[in-house]
Image: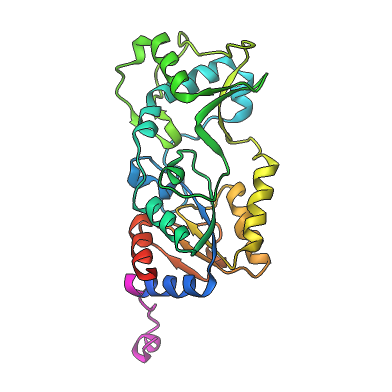
């Protein structure tokens, strides 16, 4: 701080973008290979909305809860109607610079493993290899009774054929293939059932209020324990399933860097935070690491 600033009680200006980038580059060079945790902010440039604003507040209505989906037919009707209309955004999305940069950083040996909270499959489509989809994938639908698996594209076709009245609805996209459809009547919406046992079908993703499978969590912790550093990309960490990894890293002296535009649950634990767009930051980081 300059003396004139201190003398007048002024708050020093934040680091410039160039200074933040340099701190991130220095962190990565010192602490590679990295364990990377990504969230919705990594996919916004691909046209998939995120959940929270810069202060961590919800931008949209809260997603359906697992217990409500399992217990109530009308909740499943609401979910599948919105999902039928919102899935097109997920199906049409392509990897952006954030996904491609992380895949290239993996190829360079900078990233050893990546755990994503996203369910869009874009990291794999960008040729990232060591990926754990913590919350599953929208590409698959499973039966809650007999565990039969179906392609989401097949289920999407069945939904569209059974509900022609909704085909031409114009809706605003919401996170994870959802759509904003608040005032529609879902009572006549036809939802698919398992062809094998007529059981309830659910996307093979972890809903809010549902537990992440233990084997995924164990595999992610195994990768984190072998890393020299951790990098958080595009997530507020307000959901515990992701925050637990930052807590573990902090408790085991694994330094953490973050790229996220808004506040996170672990801001006080970061060695470096680059408060900017994920795609641009990762692209610039990659350019400096090559």
For the stretch drawn in magenta, the main secondary structure is loop
273 left or right, relative to 166: right
Q: Which corner quadrant of the image does residue 59 belong to?
A: top left
Which residue lies at the image location 50% right of the left edge and 17% below the top edge?
A: 77
Q: Which corner quadrant of the image does residue 198 belong to?
A: top right
121 left or right, relative to 283: right
Name the spot of residue 7 as percent of width and height, x first.
Answer: 38, 89
- Using the image as rendered, state which of residue 191 and residue 237 is in the foreground: 191
Which residue lies at the image location 34% right of the left edge and 48% below the top edge?
A: 96
- Using the image as rendered, state which of residue 215 and residue 260 is in the foreground: 215
Which residue lies at the image location 34% right of the left edge and 53% below the top edge?
A: 97
> Where is the N terminus found, in terms of image quarters?
bottom left
Name the spot of residue 93 as percent of width and height, x first.
Answer: 35, 37
Q: Is residue 224 visible?
A: yes
Q: Is residue 17 magenta?
A: yes
239 left or right, relative to 38: right
Measured along the vertical axis of the image, is residue 83 above or below residue 229?
A: above
Q: Which residues are magenta?
A: 1-18
Q: Is residue 173 visible?
A: no
Name the spot of residue 127 as percent of width and height, x first.
Answer: 43, 48
Q: How many marks?
A: 0
- Using the image as rendered, state which of residue 119 and residue 132 is in the foreground: 132
* Coloration mode: rainbow
Measured along the vertical axis of the image, is residue 230 above or below residue 157?
A: below
Measured along the vertical axis of the image, is residue 155 above or below residue 124?
A: above
- Using the image as rendered, state which of residue 41 and residue 185 is in the foreground: 41
> Where is the C terminus found, in terms of image quarters?
bottom left
Q: Is residue 66 magenta?
A: no
Name the spot of residue 95 as percent of width and height, x first.
Answer: 36, 45
């Amino acid at each position: 701080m300059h003396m004139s600033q201190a003398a007048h009680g002024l708050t020093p200006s934040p680091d410039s973008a160039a200074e933040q980038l340099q701190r991130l580059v220095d962190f990565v060079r010192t602490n590679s290979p990295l364990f990377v945790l990504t969230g919705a902010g990594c996919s916004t440039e691909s046209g998939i909305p995120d959940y929270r604003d810069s202060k961590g507040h919800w931008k949209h209505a809260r997603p359906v809860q697992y217990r409500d989906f399992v217990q109530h037919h009308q909740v499943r009707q609401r979910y599948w109607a919105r999902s039928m209309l919102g899935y097109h955004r997920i199906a049409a999305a392509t990897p952006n610079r954030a996904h491609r940069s992380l895949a290239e950083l993996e190829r360079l040996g900078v990233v050893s493993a990546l755990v994503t909270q996203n369910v869009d499959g874009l990291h794999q489509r960008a040729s990232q290899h060591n990926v754990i989809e913590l919350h599953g994938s929208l590409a698959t639908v499973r039966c809650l009774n007999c565990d039969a698996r179906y392609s989401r594209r097949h289920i999407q076709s069945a939904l569209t054929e059974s509900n022609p009245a909704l085909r031409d609805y114009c809706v605003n996209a919401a996170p994870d293939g959802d759509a904003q459809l608040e005032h529609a009547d879902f009572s006549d919406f036809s939802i698919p059932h398992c062809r094998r046992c007529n059981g309830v079908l659910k996307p093979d993703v972890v809903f809010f209020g549902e537990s992440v499978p233990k084997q995924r969590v164990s595999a992610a912790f195994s990768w984190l324990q072998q890393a020299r550093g951790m990098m958080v990309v595009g997530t507020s960490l307000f959901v515990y399933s992701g925050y637990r990894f930052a807590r573990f890293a902090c408790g085991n002296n694994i330094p953490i860097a973050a790229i996220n535009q808004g506040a996170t649950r672990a801001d006080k634990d970061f060695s470096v935070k680059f408060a900017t767009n994920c795609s641009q930051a990762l692209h610039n980081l990659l350019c400096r690491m090559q």
